[in-house]
Image: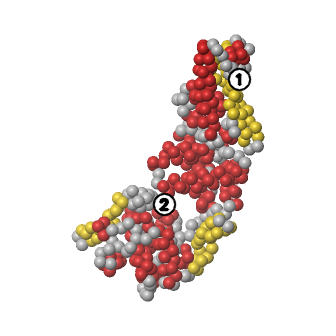
């Protein structure tokens, strides 16, 4: 529990009172001092403060001085309750006292210069700019950094996020069974936070651009046209798997995310010159889309009297896709990653060879669409339909290299 005391430390007859803050943290006692602007006389403090008096003038002075001392004390303790105790020192205490007298003076000092408190500040200021999943991702990174700092027994400042930080953080994450690509994403988030802190006047390391590690090659899992035909021709399925099969075929011919296609409705379709188009706004990017519907999709809609299959949750869709593909015999050994419990309560993606149906999830439709049509449909049109921001992002998504580009270009020369 923290305590605030006031002391008269001057040899002069009148002087400002000193303030002393005492608290205990991590089994250690801390004492810091600061100066107030409350001037009292030495004789008052020694002989009259805190003592009953029949003199009405002295009683009024006591009430006035006690009122200000209580306000200063409350301000210090309120600030202390909102601060990481590792950040508290004599400078912090004097800043808190100065802020009592001039609340607007130290606005910039209220921006944290330590990494984990800055994430809280960042989300408080920018939360309206982000979707709930993005906010959740930042909180996951914050929680990981807090565990890392506990392990390192050090609270990192923004300026300390450098190559040494990267190496220690990487080693810690590996010890917790995180994949290289996941660690790379964590470091990208930390780098973005440090750059944002720079724009707010917080000093950052000149090495933040080096917070990068080489990613492992991503396994590109998709269903080729033969496998799609194999799934499409699978008979005697229960109704819920027929529903999922229709969604899968639709997704593999429109290239959209599950968060979008599960919301499709017949009224989103318009016809023009004998062609059918679907108009909607992508949930993730907020892009307004108009995409043509292939004969495969039209056949499914016709079979369902113009309706799309029944929408289901993402989790059920993922689970049912695996059952569907297992029933369809999509079981050839395939290299990929599956989320497994590596120790009690700890789940990580584990790379290995698995029956292919175990690697199927909701993004399979978008990736299959992009991969199956690459080289036969102009890349610019595929990028438009998948909603990727750049060609580089699109090619990485389907696992294509510069060599693949050269082979495609050779068709025209």
Query: Which mark, residue 7?
Result: 1
Measuring from the top left, give residue 266's x and y in whole percent: 30, 70
197 up-or-down from 183: above or below:
above
Outermost residue to the top: 13
Query: Which mark, residue 393?
Result: 2
The quadrant in which the N terminus is found is top right
Q: Left or right? Give the position of 58 relative to 31.
A: left
Q: Residue at x 48, y 60 (%)?
A: 392
The quadrant in which the C terminus is found is bottom left
First in sequence, mark 2 or 1: give its number. Answer: 1
Measuring from the top left, give residue 23's x and y in whole percent: 71, 37
Query: Pointer 2 and pointer 1: residues touching (CB < 8 Å)?
Result: no
Considering depth in this image, is 56 or 35 the residue closer to the camera? Answer: 56
| Number of numbered discs | 2
Q: Is residue 333 among the parts visible in the rendering?
A: yes
Considering depth in this image, is 10 or 74 the residue closer to the camera? Answer: 74
């Amino acid at each position: 529990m923290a305590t605030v005391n006031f002391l008269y430390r001057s040899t002069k007859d009148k002087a400002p009172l000193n303030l002393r803050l005492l608290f205990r943290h991590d089994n250690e006692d801390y004492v810091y001092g600061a100066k107030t602007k409350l001037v009292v006389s030495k004789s008052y403090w020694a002989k009259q403060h805190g003592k009953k008096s029949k003199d009405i003038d002295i009683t009024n002075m006591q009430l006035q001085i006690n009122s200000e001392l209580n306000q200063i004390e409350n301000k210090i303790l309120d600030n202390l309750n909102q601060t990481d105790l590792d950040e508290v020192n004599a400078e912090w205490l004097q800043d808190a006292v100065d802020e009592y007298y001039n609340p607007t003076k130290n606005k910039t000092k209220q921006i944290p210069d330590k990494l984990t408190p800055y994430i809280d500040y960042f989300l408080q200021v920018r939360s309206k700019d982000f979707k709930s999943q993005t906010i959740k991702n930042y909180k996951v990174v914050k929680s990981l950094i807090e565990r890392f700092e506990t392990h390192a027994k050090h609270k990192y400042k923004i300026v300390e996020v450098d190559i040494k930080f990267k190496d220690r953080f990487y080693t810690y994450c590996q010890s917790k069974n995180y994949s290289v690509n996941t660690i790379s994403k964590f470091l990208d988030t930390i780098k973005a936070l440090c750059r944002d802190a720079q724009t707010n006047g917080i000093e950052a390391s000149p090495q933040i651009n080096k917070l990068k590690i080489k990613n492992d090659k991503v396994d590109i899992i998709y269903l080729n046209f033969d496998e799609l035909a194999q799934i499409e021709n699978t008979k005697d399925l229960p109704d819920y798997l027929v529903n999922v099969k229709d969604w899968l075929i639709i997704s593999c011919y429109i290239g959209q995310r599950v968060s979008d296609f599960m919301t499709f409705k017949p009224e989103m379709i318009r016809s023009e010159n004998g062609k059918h188009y679907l108009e909607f706004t992508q949930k993730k990017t907020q892009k307004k889309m108009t995409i043509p519907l292939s004969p495969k999709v039209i056949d499914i809609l016709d079979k369902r009297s113009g309706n799309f299959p029944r929408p289901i949750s993402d989790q059920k869709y993922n689970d049912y896709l695996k059952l569907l593909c297992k029933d369809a015999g999509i079981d050839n050994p395939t290299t990929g990653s599956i989320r497994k419990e590596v120790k009690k309560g700890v789940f990580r993606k584990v790379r290995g060879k698995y029956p292919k149906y175990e690697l199927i999830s909701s993004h399979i439709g978008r990736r299959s669409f992009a991969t199956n049509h690459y080289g036969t449909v102009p890349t610019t049109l595929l990028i438009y339909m998948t909603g990727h921001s750049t060609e580089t992002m699109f090619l990485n998504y389907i696992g294509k290299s510069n060599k693949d580009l050269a082979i495609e270009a050779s068709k025209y020369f």
